[in-house]
RNA sequence: UGGGCUAUAGCCAAGUGGUUAAGGCAUCGGACUUUGACUCCGACAUCGGUGGUUCGAAUCCACCUAGCCCAGCCA
């Protein structure tokens, strides 16, 4: 169940007092990168907060800086947000408001609340003062309104060079809040914008643009992260002095931080360039596209985010917490079939070589709606290499050993009698005998097997590739070390094995491979089946480490 | 004394003066089991510190400590 959070309280209060008919929220990404799990909190919270109270949710690209932004990111962002099921009621672009923003900036100029400053960047920084000392007023601060109007028009018309001057709000150079020390509103930047082309050579700064965007759209609750708390007075100042009809309220909450993950743009790019990961959607990454490819159900992400709540504190949430929500969602939805990832052959010596029978098994014991399937059985099967040890090591061993009888799930009991090794000393073939009386479903209960293991009939098995993922970053290594020194060399292990031969695999289907985990068909699967491990099953089995 | 914010178990997180401080993850026991899974039972904190107000405080006050953010013509 979702935790109550302070923002819900604010919204409920506003609704009760009749301040709003319904809430309007927005997710305002800067289209300059790929969305990752951290963004999911903002997306899902904005979406559910609006929907839970009968409100509206906007997607707005905050495209106020063409130098760093690119339209290609917008498509992936839209795809990711849609995948999460957070359907926006409206899609907006901040750049569509450039005319209004310019007019509002001019309003400020006319009211004597903004001025054109010709101080070069270094001087502006110098005049801003520092954390301990107040700033110094710009010599251009008190130029006449008429002159400011002329200059600002000139800026817009391209009369001046990039960086030659900026428009600044006239607030308070001695404010203890650095953001209030005459912040820059517009800069000259000759860069074509994917949306407005070359219409503009001046672009608004975030602090000015954002509150106006929110106000224009009638956003009621403008959620953002903690680092913008200091900007709230400025936000309110612009809404007020620009005489906006609507007054949105900025509310800050803590970002979702996940330790031991690589999310930084340049870091991921470097990993891709160095071939450490295969791309932005590599399953070891937590970009939304990577999670999607790995087979993580979007609903699991919703449940995970809701469970975390919306705190005002800043903590770090371990990624394994998401795993539990993935399993929880898939538990009754995925078909549970057999796959042998690291196969070893078992020959059943008392089963006729030319015989093959068909067995039936439920697809999911916890959800009968998933029906049943058929599986073949013959005298040659594959079992998991780790499910056999020549000698039973201890009483807790619940798998196959010489002289020991186990159940092949959904088939028969088999007892191992002999084993052949190859020249390297690896098990090559296990010879076993089966007991026809022990067929699954027969009700046989004269004796208990030493455990149950899964298998695949070698005569019909479909070859498949399994990609087993672990943490990209080794959590054991000092978190302060450079992330490249913390890479886990075993983060991706590729195995060639088999799945049941009679199972028809759907595109992107997620299965539970019995006793192993949840796996999803990868996009690489075409002539050959390829599965990504979405998440492993939990296990209380603790083999002794070598 | 720059300003802003945070502090509840290994991790996340409810709680806004009044019974034994929710819940989830993790962990450890135990039951069940044709998945060492699932499920089920059980264990697991006195609330950053100190002092104060009060019959009574995680909740109010004071002081202290620790951590995060702010000096882009980024967002």
Image: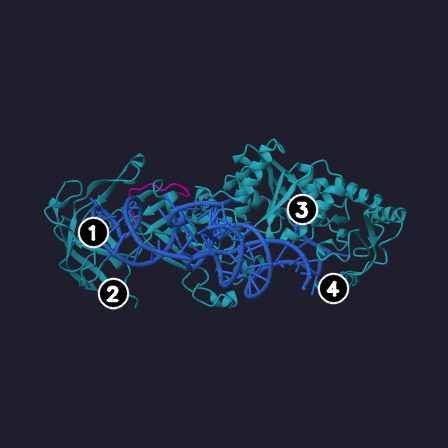
Q: Position of residue A16 (x, y in %)?
A: 58, 33
Q: Position of residue A437 (x, y in %)?
A: 11, 44
Same chain assignment for discs 4 and 3: yes
Same chain assignment for discs 1 and 4: yes
**Label 1, label 4: how many angstroms apart (C-alpha)?**
82 Å
Contact check, label 4 and label 2, Cβ < 8 Å = no
Q: What range of the chain is rendered magenta?
A: A499-510
Q: Looking at the colours in the rendered structure, which chain would you say is drawn in cyan?
A: A
Marks 3, 1: nearer the viewer: 3
Kindly identify which numbered label has been placed on residue A380. Answer: 1
Identify the residue under disc 2. A426
Identify the residue under disc 4. A133
Identify the residue under disc 3. A63
Residue at position x 86%, y 46% from top? Answer: A149
**Label 1, label 2: how many angstroms apart (C-alpha)?**
18 Å
Residue at position x 31%, y 44% from top? Answer: A336
Residue at position x 21%, y 40% from top? Answer: A358
Q: Chain of mark 3?
A: A
Q: Colour of chain B?
A: blue
Dot placed on the residue nearer the N-terminal end, 2 or 3 = 3
Most common secondary structure along the magenta stretch: loop
Please, is residue A526 above or below residue A474 in the view? above
Same chain assignment for discs 2 and 3: yes
Taking the view exactly as shown, the residue that stands out farthest to the left is A446
Badge 1 marks a residue whose secondary structure is strand
Residue at position x 86%, y 58% from top? Answer: A139
Badge 4 marks a residue whose secondary structure is loop
Q: Quadrant of residue A251?
A: top right
Of residue A166 and residue A444, the one placed in the foreground of this image is A166
């Amino acid at each position: 169940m979702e935790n109550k959070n302070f923002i819900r309280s604010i919204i409920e209060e506003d609704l009760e007092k009749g301040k709003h008919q319904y809430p309007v929220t927005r997710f305002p990404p800067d289209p300059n990168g790929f969305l990752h799990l951290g963004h999911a909190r903002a997306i899902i919270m904005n979406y559910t907060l609006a929907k839970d109270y009968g409100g509206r949710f906007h997607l707005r690209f905050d495209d106020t800086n063409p130098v760093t932004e690119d339209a290609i990111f917008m498509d992936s962002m839209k795809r990711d947000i849609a995948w999460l099921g957070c359907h926006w009621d409206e899609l907006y672009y901040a750049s569509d408001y450039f005319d209004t923003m310019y007019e509002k900036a001019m309003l400020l100029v006319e009211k004597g609340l903004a001025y054109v400053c010709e101080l070069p960047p270094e001087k502006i920084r110098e005049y801003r003062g520092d954390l301990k000392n107040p700033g110094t007023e710009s010599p251009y601060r008190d130029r006449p309104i008429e002159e400011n109007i002329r200059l600002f028009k000139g800026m817009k018309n391209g009369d001046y060079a990039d960086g030659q001057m900026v428009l600044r709000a006239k607030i308070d150079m001695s404010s203890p809040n650095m953001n209030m020390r005459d912040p820059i509103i517009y800069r000259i930047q000759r860069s074509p914008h994917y949306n407005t082309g070359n219409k503009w050579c001046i672009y608004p700064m975030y602090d000015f643009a954002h509150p106006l965007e929110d106000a224009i759209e009638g956003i009621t609750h403008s959620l953002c992260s903690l680092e913008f708390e200091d900007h709230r007075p400025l936000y309110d100042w612009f809404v007020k002095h620009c005489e906006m009809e609507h007054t949105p309220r900025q509310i800050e909450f803590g970002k979702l931080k996940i330790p031991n993950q690589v999310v930084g743009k340049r870091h991921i790019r470097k990993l891709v360039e160095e071939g450490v990961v295969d791309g932005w959607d590599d399953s070891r990454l937590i970009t939304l596209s990577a999670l999607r490819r790995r087979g993580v159900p979007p609903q699991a992400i919703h449940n995970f985010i809701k469970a975390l709540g919306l705190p005002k504190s800043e903590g770090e949430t371990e990624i394994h917490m998401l795993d539990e929500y993935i399993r929880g969602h898939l538990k009754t939805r995925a078909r549970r079939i057999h796959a042998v990832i690291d196969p070893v052959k078992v020959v059943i010596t008392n089963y006729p070589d030319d015989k093959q029978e068909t067995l039936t098994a439920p697809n999911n014991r916890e959800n009968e709606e998933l029906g049943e399937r058929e599986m073949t059985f013959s005298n040659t099967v594959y079992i998991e290499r780790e499910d056999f040890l020549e000698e039973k090591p201890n009483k807790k061993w619940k798998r196959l050993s010489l002289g020991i009888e186990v159940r092949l799930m959904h088939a028969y009991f088999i007892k191992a009698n002999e084993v052949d090794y190859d020249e390297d000393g690896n098990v090559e073939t296990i010879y076993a005998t089966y007991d026809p009386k022990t067929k699954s479903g027969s009700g046989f209960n004269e004796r208990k097997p030493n455990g149950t293991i899964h298998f695949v009939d070698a005569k019909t098995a479909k070859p498949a590739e399994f990609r087993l993922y672990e943490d990209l970053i080794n959590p054991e290594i000092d978190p302060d070390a450079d992330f490249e020194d913390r890479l886990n060399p075993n983060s991706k292990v590729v195995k060639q094995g088999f799945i049941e031969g009679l199972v028809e695999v759907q595109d992107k289907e997620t299965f539970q491979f019995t006793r192993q985990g949840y796996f999803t068909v990868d996009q690489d699967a075409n002539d050959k089946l390829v599965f990504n491990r979405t998440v492993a099953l939990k296990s209380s089995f603790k083999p002794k480490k070598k």
